[in-house]
Image (cartoon, rainbow, N blue to C red):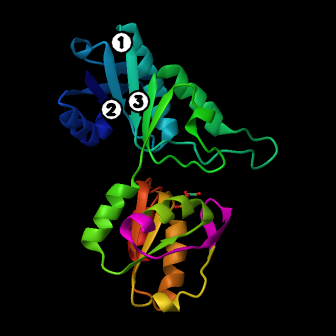
Amino acid sequence: MTVFAFAQQQEPAQALATELGTACSIVECHRFPDGESCIQIEPELIADSCVVYASLVQPDNITLPLFFLAHTLRDYGVQHITLVAPYLAYMRQDKIFKSGQGVTARYYARLLSSCFDKLVTVDPHLHRIHDLADIYSIETKLVRAAPAVSNWLKANVSSPVIIGPDSESAQWVKKLAKNSGAPFLVLEKTRRGDRDVEVIVPQVEKWTDCTPVLFDDIISTGKTMIETIKHLLAAGLSAPVCIGIHAVFADAAWQQIKQA
Ligand code: R5P
């Protein structure tokens, strides 16, 4: 079994291949001047069963090359392809938010299901869609981040209070709090736009002796984290530890979170 990946994701793909005791093959993706792309695989590394490693950050850039890669592997005789996508994109577009839109989580699932036989992903954003099987027609396997995060917390943070910025984060925050034996709070968030969120923080003064640990599944623009950080600092809590399962970091999110 070979692990195939695009060059930008070589490091984690190689780590996965090492863990599996198999080869990692980098797929070339040539961009023509007109914007089309051409996939080049190493045909000598083809096996009956292959893994494609592709975290789906910036999904519109990677999905068409991924589609070509899957079909190329099939044409070279691969029988079974597992997509390992730690970050599964498009899961937040899980309903029609405004008339005229579609449920892109479903369409994206349909596309990936037509390319791969199995999907392995880490804590997808299951909110209004409760099970990947509701939208993916292929076998899916979820890896949970909470055990690794709680082990890290136990080893690195003393007296944590775990804070989820919105109701969607409650599912992860509760697991993390239970695993690490820490108290938790779940805040209320209202999103007014892509980069405009309001977070309502209740009385948190009783937690001033604790280390606040903000925990969310996805950090995209970072605004959710930043708004929460501002409130916590204003209430006299210390600078929080911020944990996101999927560090998407759109635009300057990383710099802005550090500044906050
Ligand atoms: C939303 O429902 C997710 O759980 C995250 O809270 C959200 O994606 C964070 O986005 P941003 O970093 O852009 O505020």
Say which mark, if any, is on residue 222: none
In the drawing, does residue 44 fall left or right of residue 110? Answer: left
For ligand 1, which image quadrant applies? Answer: bottom right
Residue wearing tag 3: 83
| Kind of residue sitting beneath label 1 | Val
Q: CA distance from mark 2 to mark 3?
A: 13 Å
Q: CA distance from mark 1 to mark 2?
A: 18 Å
Dots 1, 3 in contact, CB < 8 A:
no
Name the residue beneath numbered marker 2: 6
Where on the picture, by quarter, is residue 239?
bottom left
Residue 202 at what x, y percent from top left?
Answer: 61, 83
Q: Which residues are magenta?
A: 177-198
Left or right, 22 with respect to 162, comes to left
Q: Which mark is residue 78?
A: 1
Check disc 2 and give the amino acid type: Phe
N-terminal of the pair, mark 2 or mark 3, is 2
* Left or right, 187 with reference to 24: right
Residue displayed at 38% across by 34% down: 84
- Residue at point 58%, 40% (across, down): 131
Tell me which numbered mark, 1 or 3, is placed earlier along the sequence.
Answer: 1
Front in this rendered view, residue 175 or 25: 175
Q: Mark 1 vs mark 2: give the one in front.
A: 1
Where does residue 152 sit, x and y in percent of width and height? 29, 64
Residue 194 colored in magenta in the image: yes
Q: Is residue 208 on the magenta stretch?
A: no
| Horizontal and vertical percent position of residue 59 | 50, 39
